[in-house]
Structures are given as structure tokens and as C-alpha cells.
Image (cartoon, rainbow, N blue to C red):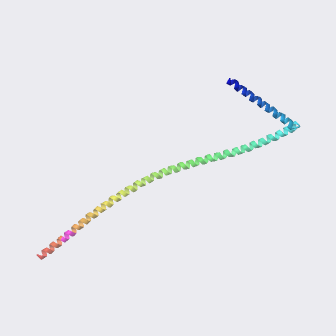
Amino acid sequence: AKGTMVRMTNDRDEARKQMEGLYAKQGRGKQFRTKKDRDAHLQTQVKELQAAKAEKEELLNGQRDKLSGLRKSVASEAKDVEKKRKDLQQKAKMLDELKRSVDEKKRLRNEMADSRKEQWRSISELSDKVTEAKEASRRALHDMKRS
């Protein structure tokens, strides 16, 4: 049933196309007085269509050239982006290394500062002991001289 329906629909469409073609022929017959007039008109239409086709082909070629240029540009930009991405990764790696180096140098600086403070305390204690010993020695000499 479906096959019959499709076949009938196709037959109807084909008949409609034939009918439109006949109407078009009939219209051309009424439009022109002679075959020469008709042929001249048809030649003009053919030339117009060929000119339109050439114009469209030229436009299409221009668009193709533009597309080709854009593709090259995109490829070039993609290479630049990749290069910059690699450069950025390298710089990030260098930044991490520098940060580690700075952190290590800060740690060493702090250790040295602590060591210096400790040495100053030792020097201060030794200086106090030397001062006390000098004072004790001076007192002892003074006591010895008095006695």
C-alpha cells in the first residue's frame, strides 16, 4: 500500500512537471513573433546566465583564497600559541626554581643570624667573665696592697 502511494505521488509530480514545461513552451510561443526573436532572447539570457556564473565563480574563488589565507593565519597563530605556551611553562619552571633558591637562601640567612646571635651572647658572657675576673683581680691586688 505504501509502495503504491509513493509510486502514485511520483507519477503525479512527474505529470505536474510535464504540464509546467508545456505551459512554459506555450508562453514563449506567445511572447515572440519569430524563432529568430526567441533565439535572440534566449541567447541574451544564456549570456546573462554565463556572466552571472562567471561572477559567482570569481566570488567563490575569492572566498576560497580568503579561506586559504585564514587557514594559514590560524595555523601560524596556533604555532605562536604553542610556542608561547612552552615559553610560559619554561618560565614557570624557572620561577619555581628561583623560589626554591630564595627560600633556601632565606633559611641559610636565618640560620646564620641565629648563629651570630648565639656568638654575640657567648662573646658577651665571656666579656662579662673577663670584666668580673679583672675586677676580682683588681680587688685582690688592692686587698693585697692594704694588708
Q: Which is more toward the observer, 120 or 26?
A: 26
Q: Position of residue 91 (x, y in %)?
A: 47, 53
Q: Residue at x 79, y 31 (%)?
A: 19
Of all residues, the one furthest to the bottom in this rendering is 146
Magenta stretch: includes residue 34: no
Q: Is residue 93 left or right of residue 18?
A: left
Q: Which is more toward the observer, 141 or 49?
A: 49
* Location of residue 37 with respect to 130 vertically, above or below: above
* Location of residue 141 with respect to 123 vertically, above or below: below
Q: Is residue 18 left or right of residue 35?
A: left
Q: Quadrant of the N terminus?
A: top right
The quadrant where residue 25 appears: top right
The quadrant where residue 104 appears: bottom left
Q: Is residue 7 left or right of residue 99?
A: right
* Location of residue 23 with respect to 138 vertically, above or below: above
Q: Position of residue 135 (x, y in %)?
A: 19, 71
Q: Residue at x 44, y 54 (%)?
A: 95
Of all residues, the one furthest to the left in this rendering is 147
Q: Residue at x 80, y 41 (%)?
A: 47
Q: Look at the image and give the residue range highlighted in magenta.
A: 131-135
Q: Quadrant of the C terminus?
A: bottom left
Number of callouts in the render? 0
Q: Position of residue 68 (x, y in %)?
A: 64, 45
Q: Is residue 42 left or right of residue 103?
A: right
Main SS class of the magenta portion in the image: helix
Q: Position of residue 97 (x, y in %)?
A: 42, 53
